Image (cartoon, grey):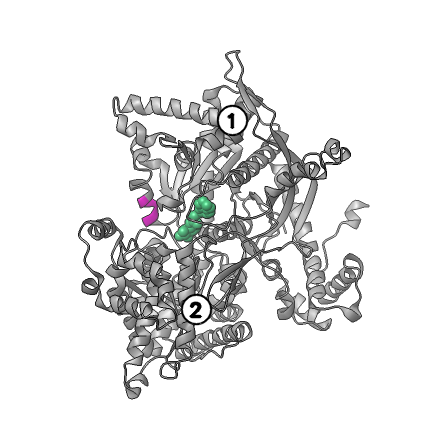
Amino acid sequence: VWKEAMRNLDNDVPSIERSVVNHVQTSLARQAYNLDDTGAYQAAALSVRDNLILNWNETQLLYTKKSPKRAYYLSLEFLMGRTLDNALLNLGLKDQYNESVKHLGFSMEDILEQERDAALGNGGLGRLAACYLDSSASQELPVWGYGLRYQYGIFQQLISPEGQQLEAPDPWLQNQNPWELPRLDVTYEIRFYGNAERLQDGSGRAAWHGGQEVLAVAYDVMIPGCYTKNTNNLRLWESKPKRGFDLNSFNAGDYERAVESSNSAAAITSVLYPNDHTTFGKELRLKQQYFWTAASLQDILRRFKNTGKTITDFPDFVSIQLNDTHPTLAIPELMRILIDEEEVQWDMAWHIVTRTFFYTNHTVLPEALEKWPVPLMEHLLPRHMQIIYDINMIFLQAVEKKYPGDRDRLGRMSLIEEGFPKQVRMAFLACIGSRKVNGVAELHSELVRTTILKDFVEFEGISKFGNVTNGITPRRWLDQCNPELSALISKTLKLEKSVWLKDLYKLKDLLPYADDAEFRKQWVAVKQHNKERLARHVKTTLGFEVNTNAMFDVQIKRLHEYKRQNLNIFGVIHRYLTIKNMAPEERKKLNPRVVFFAGKAAPGYWIAKLTIRLIVNVARVINADPDTKDYLSLYFLPDYSVSLAEVLIPASDISQHISTAGTEASGTSNMKFCLNGGLLVGTVDGANIEIAEEVGETNVFFFGHLAPAVEELRYQHVYHPVPIEEKCPALANVLNQVSSGVFGDGGVYEPLLNTIRQGDYYLLSDDFDSYIAALDMVDKAYLDKTEWVKKSIRTTANMGKFSSDRAINEYAESYWNLESVKVPN
Ligand code: 26V
């Protein structure tokens, strides 16, 4: 009876229509006559979800039956964006649903716009996690993600008329979220504070009791693979109080007290911290980290134990990837469970731990390296602090043995940094507790080995320290965001997209078409179409008419001094002043250029917010200047998001990746632009270098000093400063124009300008001239349209390496020793 009743869903158009209508009537309890786009979106989503659920069930059942080795990706951030379009494409059901919703009187484009982004991340690190989930499922690898179900994602960015960034909450769960399955029965208890007492029985165990206990509740998000039934899981934890609220206080009439503990439990997963690249030592952030790692480990251990295997085999069946140091508490937490609860001896426990974990570093900027004050750790996690001290003692004894009497080295390598207060160095703990450590692009991995972890490379041997260059999913970042280009590629290669989207090196076969005039015409038409789509977005959000015949020049990323949006805006001002000084006849020879910026600043990052303000005010002046506006215009698009990136990236001719050399670990939007046929202006940094290796140096506009020069230049700035007027007159002129009030009250920008006039830590004055020269090269190259289009085609054709499928396979093969498990069709 069950077999007969359990059949797959029919996905012909009439069946899909019935399914959607059925969801309107039953799941939504609504009626056709007053159904709006939101309702239609919800019904379509629920109908698609039915497919995902069936595939998810089959996948999880197969994984359980086969009990293969599994990998877990622990990330505090998953920047997923929208799901409906992605699910339709991965399931291969886009055409059928298009037709069905059209029959029902709706447009798919409008329906897709109804979905809110799931924006549970800050930037590159969170988006990378999302791409890796897509690739794991597409490669049929048994990988689960673990994260937090924040009530509020990254803040919504508003820009005041003065150009000030304002933050508003992002209540993304306000409407129903069809993409998650609440698992209210999957819960774990998590303890904070209390006391840890070492048992006096010589076992090395301790008892941790008292304090606060909260509950972690699981929510599962289905992750469909591309053209496969395999559907993986992203498990997000929500915090809630262990017992409703305190009834005693309630009965005594003290209502505030009664809800206090329940509020403090719920607060743990209430909001994503909107900082990246700056640590701040807030207790709630540490609570988030422990809550999430402890819940995830309990869940992983329970699943492992259900297979009946013995605990010493744990690393042969479980690999855990730590996405930056944020989940590093998993290391002492697994030690605690093994020793205090499973009664494993210390050495064996450490052996298990150090074969289970893998650590990815995502930045070498000192201000981003996590350190937690010892007093805070002792208070919140007393047992973990004991364990960290024990790990440190044993570790330093080994260092002392290898380098007798080298006290400097012991101080440098200690997990505990001396000071007031003492602090735990999380990157060092992650490093010694892991089997492999990797950076995210070749240059970055080399910097990890030679700077922040140099002593550890010497001590543990170089083979532990590797590189996995980041990647991006071509499903979202080509097929979904640029359907016209995807169709052109399939048609030209005479390949189903299901083939080349899963083997991106196939794009190489586009190379000969660079010399085919008819193909180039189609290539240009796609780009033009995408520019017009972006222009419509600008028209609706800002009310401006964008010149779609201009070159589109884009910089979109978090605002940060190291990413040098300042360099870009100073370059724009320089260009504006140059055009202003030209004779009208001269101007007519110019390429019109439209410059787009988008990105959020951390709410407390004052200089970054000033940069936004400057961009907005420069835009106000130059967009209104009749002398120049036909040749140069500038837009700051508010509230950058995954969905906005999907509109901006396919429309770009050129994009800017201009970090001070050695500061941008990888960058991943650089890959997205190139995959969509945009060219790069960039420094010799991060993944720019490897992109140029693949697409050819002639197709990338490089400028600026190289990473090895940076230290010396900074030294010169401090000890032999040269006035900026002397060193870089062009930049000095720009700064003076800003000061003098050409773009509104100059005084406002003084603190920003002073970061360059004094110290200039990110070396704008060293790179400005070569930056301007690179932009001139771009102009020159763009004048030869044919040559430009050839560059564009060759760039896309050579981007195979940057598929996140390649990256995730490197993790699976070289690190996790993981094999795929295919769900039969
Ligand atoms: C650090 C911190 C520090 C404490 C406060 C909260 C917080 C949140 C996030 C981070 C992570 C910073 C590291 C990061 O995002 N790195 C970026 O990772 C991308 C993916 O590997 C890479 O492409 C970017 O170049 C790199 O900046």
Instruction: Name the residue that disc number 1 marks.
Output: 382
Q: Earlier in the sequence, mark 1 or mark 2?
A: 1
Rendered residue at 38%/52% (across/down): 666
Above or below for 531 versus 303: below
Please tell me whether residue 740 is drawn above or below residue 147 in the rendered image.
below
Q: Is mark 2 within 8 Å of ligand 1?
A: no
- Residue furthest top as drawn: 201
Across and down, in percent, residue 204 comes to 50, 17
- Image quarter of residue 815: top left
Left-right relation of 231 to 29: left
**Mark 2: secondary structure:** helix
Q: Residue most toward the right? A: 1
Question: Compared to 342, does 275 lie above or below?
Answer: below
Q: Disc 2 marks which amino acid? A: Val
- Identify which residue, 79 or 633, lies in the foreground: 633
Q: Which residues are magenta?
A: 443-447
Answer with the quarter of the image where residue 32 lies: bottom right
| Residue receiving disc 2 | 616
Q: Is residue 695 among what the camera can see?
A: no
Q: Label 1 is placed on what type of residue?
A: Pro
The image quadrant that residue 564 belongs to is: bottom left
Q: Is residue 443 above or below residue 704?
A: above
Determine whether, in the image, residue 274 is placed left or right of residue 152: left
**What residue is at 61 percent from the left and 60 percent from the top?**
116
